Structure formats: C-alpha cells, structure tokens
Amino acid sequence: MTKKVVLASGNAGKLREFFRILGSAGFEIAPQSDYDVVDVPETGLTFVENAIIKARNAAQHTGLPALADDSGIEIDALNGRPGIYSARYSGKGDDANNIKLLEEMKDVPDGERTARFRCCIVYMRHGDDPSPLIADASWEGTILHELSGANGFGYDPLFFVPTHGTSSAELSADEKNTISHRGKALQQILKLMSDANV
C-alpha cells in the first residue's frame, strides 16, 4: 500500500531528489503547495530546528504525515557560514548566492577552501508528534574558484567533490543521490521509517 506523505518544500530541486528516492521506496510524495500550505518562518538556529518547524507546519495544515529537510553549505574559512542561511545568503536566489560566495572567497587559498553540504530531514507522523524521526548527513568537499557544471541547483556548481574529481553540478542525478548529503539523509530517514513501521 502506498503511503502518502506531504513534503514541506517548494524548492524544485529538492522535490526532484525526494521524488526520485522516496518514490522508488513506495511513498507517494505530495508537495505542500498541493494543499495551499504557506511557508512558515524559519526561526530556528540549527538545521534540525528549522526542519522540525517546517514539518510540523505541513503536518498541522494537511493532517498528513510530513517530511521536511533543512540543508545548506558550511564553509570553514567563513566560520561555517552561510549555514542555515544558505538559501537566503544574498537574498536574491541561487545565481546571486554563488556570486556572493565567490566574492567572499576570492582571497582564500586552495588549501583553506574546505566545506561541506549538510542536510537534516525530519519525519513528523502528525502535527503534534512529540518524537519526530530525524536524520542528519553531510558531504565533504571544497569550494571552486569558478562555476562548473549545469546539473543540480544551489551551490552545486561551486562544490568540488574530491572523490569524483568534478563539481556536484557535473554529476548525474543518480550519482549525486548516491553520495550527497541529501541522498545519505534520505536513506537514513527511510531506514528509521522502516524500523518504526511507518
């Protein structure tokens, strides 16, 4: 039997990744926009707090179980910034975010450009769930000096993956879903959901 879960996101890139992985696991994923759920302010100070806020909001408004992720890029030379503010870094979208990051990193030498993508995914059984399932994963890499690749979204064109010798935006969707922060967190949450008989 297919289990319907609402996804607390309007990000097209995230939706594709969730559909690809969870759909093959037998879940019917519906974006919160199908239910006219309005985005809730992300007032948390950590990825897990923001994911809980978004999942609870979607579950309360739809009456369905909800999944939410909060993710971003942490750059060591910037003391972990932009972190939870990754999507809002420039206030003007992906392209402007990448331009701002390149500007901030222009004087940082190669050996100090380490970074990681982090993803926290929360599964909320219902709007009042006191113990949501939580998965957390990261993906280590470095920041390039210029954009490279046309796949993916967000900071993918600037994130160099040492294990593959390419940017994240040069990986195929299947390759990315196998090794990325979100791919790993989705596999974790699927196992937690299975263990909990969700």
Image (tube, rainbow, N blue to C red):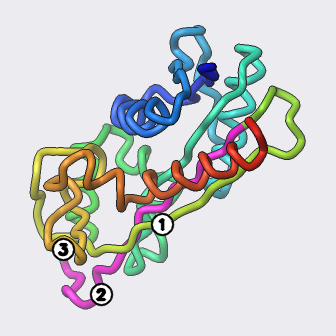
Q: Is residue 20 left or right of residue 55?
A: left
Q: Nearer the viewer, residue 158 or 95?
A: 158
The crowd level at tag 1 (other Cα within 10 Å; few <14, some 14-19, many 20+) is: many
Q: Which residues are magenta?
A: 107-123
Distance from Cα at disc 1 to Cα at disc 2: 18 Å
Where in the figure is residue 129, as x and y percent of width and height? 86, 35
Q: Is residue 123 left or right of residue 148?
A: right
Q: Is disc 3 placed on a helix, strand or loop?
A: loop
Dividing the picture into quarters, in which one does residue 157 lie? bottom left
The crowd level at tag 2 (other Cα within 10 Å; few <14, some 14-19, many 20+) is: few
| Residue 15 part of the magenta-drawn span | no
* Label 3 or label 2, whichever comes before in sequence order: 3
Distance from Cα at disc 3 to Cα at disc 2: 12 Å
Query: Which kind of residue does numbered mark 1 sit on?
Result: Ser
Mark 1 lies on residue: 138
Query: Which kind of residue does numbered mark 3 sit on?
Result: Lys
Q: Is residue 73 above or below residue 59?
A: below
Instruction: Report the quarter where the C terminus lies.
Output: top right
